Image: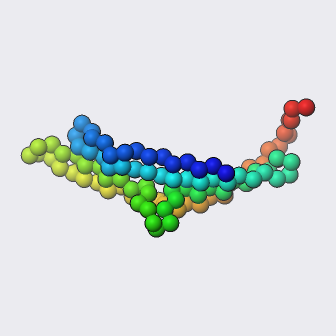
Amino acid sequence: MQFSFNYLSDRNTAMGEDSRFYSPNLTFRKTFLEDMLAATLQLQNIDMGLLNTNEQRITTSWPNQLYTTTNYVYEVDMVSLPLSYTFNSTKNR
């Protein structure tokens, strides 16, 4: 089992500011058939409707000339189940 939490704090840029951004992920891995088959369950961008994960606002401004703001909302609660099989596995003896 592995848990990761990526976080970028609020920050000022040369032309404006970027809001905070965070993305929690959880992974479970299980091997079968003498470690030749591996199944990995990945839960990416965990949100479950409770958090504002994977959302960011980027604001750009220049006095009296330019003002733009963009809200980025990325996919949340993604689930994947990759399988891998190793052929001709050589083990240390």
User: Can residue 63 be seen in this snapshot?
Assistant: yes
Residue placed furthest toward the left: 64
Quadrant of image for the C terminus: top right
Query: Picture coordinates of residue 21 (x, y %)?
Result: 40, 50
| Display colour scheme | rainbow
Residue 77 image offset from top left, x and y in percent: 52, 62
In the picture, residue 55 is in which quadrant?
Answer: bottom left
Residue lying at the far top of the rendered structure: 93
Q: Is residue 12 left or right of residue 62?
A: right
Q: Is residue 48 above or below residue 63?
A: below
The residue shown at (15%, 47%) is 66
The residue located at (59%, 50%) in the rendering is 3
Q: Is 76 situated left or right of 82 in this image?
A: left
Where 71 falls versus 86 (above or below)?
below
Horizontally, residue 68 falls left or right of residue 75, namely left
Q: Residue at x 87, y 32 (%)?
A: 92
Q: Please, which residue is most extreme toward the right here? A: 93
Answer yes or no: is residue 74 visible: no
1 vs 62, left or right, is right
Task: From this view, report whether residue 13 is shown above or below residue 54.
Answer: above
Identity of the residue drawn at 17% across and 50% down = 67
Q: How many marks?
A: 0
- Between 5 and 34, the residue placed more toward the observer is 5
Residue 29 location, x and y as percent?
71, 52
